[in-house]
Amino acid sequence: MNLQRLWTLARKDWADAFKNTSVVVPMIVLPFFFVVLFPVLFIVIPAFSPQIGQSLASDPDIQPLLNNLPPFLQPYTQGLDVQRTVIVLMLGLMLSPMFLILPLMTSTVIAADSFAGERERKTIEALLYTPASDRELFFGKVLAALIPAVGLTWGSFLVYTLVVNLASYWTMGWVWFPLPTWYPLIFWISPALSLLGVAFTVWISARNPTFMGAYQMSGVLVVLVLPLLFGQIAGVVYLTVEVGLLAGAVIWAVALGLTRFVAHGFNRQRLLAGL
């Protein structure tokens, strides 16, 4: 496999994708909401409005969570009042599965713009007749979506860490984030989800006539995050370090298997026949 061709294909996809507002806008809006807006409002509003802070602390939906804190979280909440415990619980634990939407969203939106976007721009035939092999063409597309997905997730995690610690320092009195549970989530699970999203969406977008159609079909991957989210809310399963490592291993196995399957079945002649 020619690495220079892979890099050239990836750069071409980036040049095309980042001209598309349907690609760029979700990559800006969703991280801004999860990484900046929500944590700032969640911390600052109760801090400057005691009534809101008291109502939040006495919320019947939150009380069961406070009364049944998972053992691994208790050392981080020991000696804290209710308001600070809620901050650690919500921003340090409950929001963590939602962060996994970022690599899925980024990888699928860029990958959907690959062949489906090329088809809409009427440039797919020229691309498919390039000297690159089918394998190089496929992995060039994978690389083009995988790098931004992982990069955006890791960058968002860094910004989230700064925002949470700065916004909560006046209330908490020390730098408390990130908790250890976040490391496997960000550096182990999110790259696996990115690869899974890329492989699935490249396969879909090579067969779907439109960018939005491929992107919407790939949206079913979000259901992978829901069991972790609702499992934590219900107290059934928590995203501990051990659970994160195990979940990541399973996702990596599925992602690598799907990537191999899609790469093996990828054929430009079959794709051209459907044009």
Image: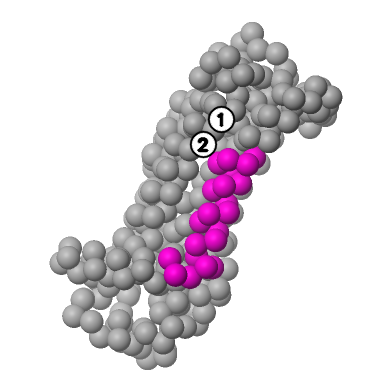
Percent of width and height locating residue 107: 44, 59
Nearest the eye: 123 or 228 = 123
What's under tag 2, amino acid-wise?
Answer: Tyr
Residue span colored magenta: 18-38
In the figure, 251 relative to 235: above or below?
below
Mark linked to residue 258: none
Residue reaching furthest top?
A: 79
In the figure, 238 relative to 176: above or below?
below
Percent of width and height locating residue 260: 31, 63
Would you say 68 lies left or right of 262 here? right
The answer to whether the residues at label 1 and label 2 have Cβ atoms under 8 Å apart is: yes
Mark linked to residue 164: 1
Percent of width and height locating residue 176: 52, 20
Percent of width and height locating residue 242: 45, 30
> Callout 1: helix, strand or loop?
helix
- Residue 258 showing in the rendered view: no
